[in-house]
Amino acid sequence: MATVKRLYNRSDEWLKGLSRGPYAVFLGISSGVGVLIAGLLVSRDLLLVQALTIALVMFSLEYAFGLHQTTDE
């Protein structure tokens, strides 16, 4: 369990260190992969279109509104 916690903490610190653009890319890719995996488990109708759409939407929203702030301004 300690290994999982260390991995989580390292990942969290790495993500907090990213600027808006790279974080938005990471968020888009991870959400697209998540939809792709969930779609493979549930159904395969328009799976690739759904995954690409959610990836683009998540990237766009994060990049436009920047809810992930790495600096105090």
Image: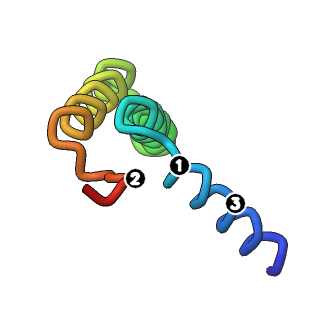
- State which quadrant residue 25 falls in: top left
Report the residue at 25% width, 33% height from top.
63
Q: Name the residue under label 1.
A: 17
Report if residue 39 is visible in the image: no
* Foreground pick, 9 / 30: 9
Report the residue at 16% width, 42% height from top.
65
* Foreground pick, 72 / 6: 72
Q: Are marks 1 and 2 in contact (CB under 8 Å)?
A: yes
Label 2 secondary element: loop
Amino acid type of the residue tagged 1 in the rendering: Gly
Label 1 secondary element: loop
Report if residue 48 is visible in the image: yes
Spatial CA distance of label 1 from label 3 is: 11 Å
Q: Give the left or right position of residue 44, taking residue 56 as reference.
A: right
Q: Are marks 3 and 2 in contact (CB under 8 Å)?
A: no
Spatial CA distance of label 3 from label 2 is: 16 Å
Q: Quadrant of the C terminus?
A: bottom left
* Foreground pick, 8 / 51: 8
Label 3 secondary element: helix
Q: In which quarter of the image is the N terminus?
A: bottom right
Q: Name the residue under label 3.
A: 10
Q: Which of marks 1 and 3 is in front?
A: 1
